[in-house]
Amino acid sequence: MSELVTFGETMLRFSPPGKQRLENASELEVHAGGAESNVAITAQRLGTPATWLSKVPETPLGRRAVGELRQHGIDTDVVWSHRGRQGTYYVEQGGSPRGTNVVYDRADSAITTASAHEFDLDRIQDAQVFFTSGITPALSSSLRDATANLLKAARQGGTTTAVDFNYRRKLWSPEEAEGTMTKLFPGIDILVIAARDARTVLGFEGDPRQLAHKLGSQYDFTTVVVTRGDEGAIAWHDSVVHDHDAYETETVDAIGTGDAFTGAFIARRLDGDDVPTALEYAAATAALKRTIPGDAALVTAEEVEAVVSEHGQDISR
């Protein structure tokens, strides 16, 4: 059985080579990408057996997405559907001031009809950690119920639950996200949230350390990780706050960086590391991901260890 089980949608990502515009591109690169599968891939590559649960259309594109994830070594336990479509998205990379543009095409995807009873709950309850993200309940009312029920099942089985808040303004409003996610909070042990989302969606004020303390004290989380972009991350655990700066990196593709961070943090905690050490390895993994095209952090444990060894910080507090 896998130590980590994740649940969510994986899309096919299409990108013009280099920094070409979508409107005149003559070819597109294809990668599978989704927050929950990205987390599973990262954990798997760092030595934590991982399973990804989802509902996928029985189509060539659906099989393409699942096949790629299997190539990365994770176990895929999917419900094959004859209704709905394979979600896709398009990434147009651009330098400053144009920046990167993301275009979603995921309406009516197969996973939007998923319900908890379609999945093998024993897989979740036999795992050590169950992970999903705030993207999943944003996709449909069915997925809001499914997410809540799967978190409940995990808790009932004694499985630790972890969620990346992962607010996406293209999917729902701050008010919708706040209303749904705070209802899920009682079923979450580990929360990962960007500082900007804690402020914009939850209405919290203060610096990242204050945000971590407030979230940890107001809700019954075991651990709260507040990410702060290129400034690193803060973790609240047992009423103590730990922090770690981001590592310098040459960015090739930033998409998936947060998932790499979260996957590494969970993997290292499962391996027995304390929170400061898990933060250190998560930061190193995130830095490596930014050098790799596509969504997945195709890193090795040895590469992560090398970054930590060469650039490690004094993380004692």
Image: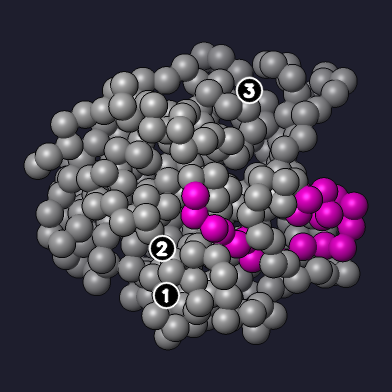
Front one among 55 and 138: 55
**Residue at 64% of width from left, 33% of height from top?**
294
Tell me the SS state at disc 2: strand
Residue 27, can we see it?
yes
Q: Is residue 275 left or right of residue 144?
A: left
Q: Earlier in the sequence, mark 2 or mark 3?
A: 3
Residue 141, can we see it?
no
Task: Tell me the quadrant of the picture where the C terminus can be found.
Answer: top left
Q: Earlier in the sequence, mark 3 or mark 1?
A: 3
Q: Which residue is mark 2?
A: 162
State the mark number for residue 93.
3
* Above/below status of 29 relative to 268: above
Q: Is residue 74 left or right of residue 164?
A: right
Q: Nearer the viewer, mark 3 or mark 1?
A: 1
Crowding near pointer 2: few (<14 within 10 Å), some, many (20+)?
many
Kind of residue sitting beneath label 3:
Gln
**Residue at 12% of width from left, 60% of height from top?**
239
Which region of the structure is painted magenta?
Answer: 47-67
